[in-house]
Image (tube, rainbow, N blue to C red):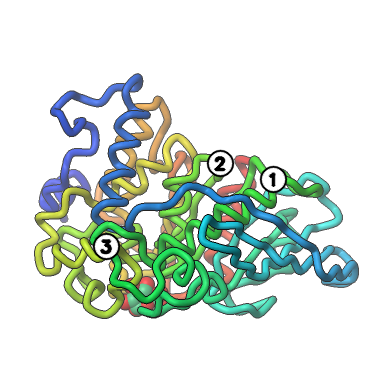
Amino acid sequence: MKTIPELLCERELPELLIMRDGTPVTRDNWPARRAELLDILQQELYGVTPAPCPVEGKIIQTDERYCAGKVRHDTVDLTLHTPYGDHTFPVQLFRPKANPNAPVFLHICFRPDFPDRYSPIEEITDHGFAFAMFDYNTVATDDGDFTNGLGGLYVGDRKRRPHEWGKLGMWAYAASRVLDWLETIDGIDAKKVTVTGHSRLGKTALWCAAQDERFFCGISNDSGCGGAAIERGKVGERTERITEVFPFWFCPRYKDYSGHAELLPFDHHFIVACVAPRYCYIASAEEDLWADPASEYLSAAAGSAAYELLGLPGVLPVCETMPTAPAEFHDGTIGYHVRKGLHYYGREDWLRQMAFLEARV
Ligand code: GCU
């Protein structure tokens, strides 16, 4: 059986710890390297993220009796005052009354429903976490239409420029704006906010945490291609398929690499590295071969080099060979698990992710 270093070597990854001009990366110039990595990821994959805009949150409804009265639930209208006009979308916030300084999960959701099969709210608030969520479609629809929501404000019906942001970038940007608002309210610890999402929204959450250093942790659940998974040598979904079916998730430039992942000036361990020195968590499902658990694990392993440079353990314990489900790596700054079963954001994922965070908040 091949060892992890052998498997990584086969992928021929671009160098993480060498600056563009060839200078080796040290602890001192790491911030400059991180800025380079973010720039590469913006130019080539997700598109350029605009500057933050002012936000305004208005609580429009409060339910003090949620979950047998254990939880205060607020429905909030969050308005982003962009330079091109305002966009308002609903955010739901659930604060456990038993913990007045609660760490928070900010879940970028597929649906407006609460609870939802991917959002076991009572379980999460019973663990002492607050839970904030928004439905990604209310920020910008999940399609090639750039005439609604943030798409309408920033792009409209013209053709996007090669490095202009796509929908993943817009959803990630919205999550950062939710954090702007969370920083202004009571009953939570805004320094302990974890952004999370599943699948396409796992890609989004990881990109959000990579860029926004205020997030305590970024979780990618089964994010696969375009998210946590190493693209070179990936099985299941690959660059050519994702850029064909979902070109609007990324910047137009990314499509140039269709069929040529080996030419990408990055690979996805760059994204994990940008989260350093903060916590990062990658979750995989054994039967989710479309996402490719092995490639997801490899980006945790390769991204660990940035953490080690900063004097922190990456993914721990170190695994000699590819982990098989069920397996959990909770001793380092990057958490990882691979569970049995299919593509899903289930109770087991949440329980493992909460256990990782509970030991750290
Ligand atoms: C498709 C897509 C994946 C994505 C998934 C999802 O399967 O190919 O890249 O992660 O949808 O978001 O559910």
Marks 3 and 2, the one that precedes in the sequence: 3
Residue 345 pos. (x, y %) = 51, 71
Counting every numbered tag in the picture gives: 3
* Helix, strand or loop at mark 1: loop
Among numbered discs 3 and 1, the one appearing first in the sequence: 3
Is there a contact, CB below 8 Å, between mark 2 and mark 1?
A: yes
User: Mark 2 falls on what kind of element?
Assistant: loop
Q: Are the residues tagged 3 and 1 within 8 Å (C-beta)?
A: no
- Identify residue for label 1: 183
Q: Residues within 10 Å of mark 3 (few under 14, many from 20)?
A: few
Kind of residue indicated by mark 2: Arg
Q: Residue furthest top?
A: 28
Measure how far apart labels 3 and 1 are at the Cα level: 33 Å
The residues tagged by marks 3 and 2 sit, at their Cα atoms, a distance apart of 29 Å
**Which mark, residue 214?**
2
Q: Nearer the viewer, residue 183 or 355?
A: 183
The image position of residue 62, as x and y in percent, is 85, 68
Residue type for callout 1: Glu
User: Looking at the image, is mark 3 or mark 2 nearer the viewer?
Assistant: 3
Mark nearest the camera among 3 and 1 is 3
Residue at horizontal 18 percent and vertical 33 percent from the top = 20
- Can you identify the residue that label 3 sits on? 161
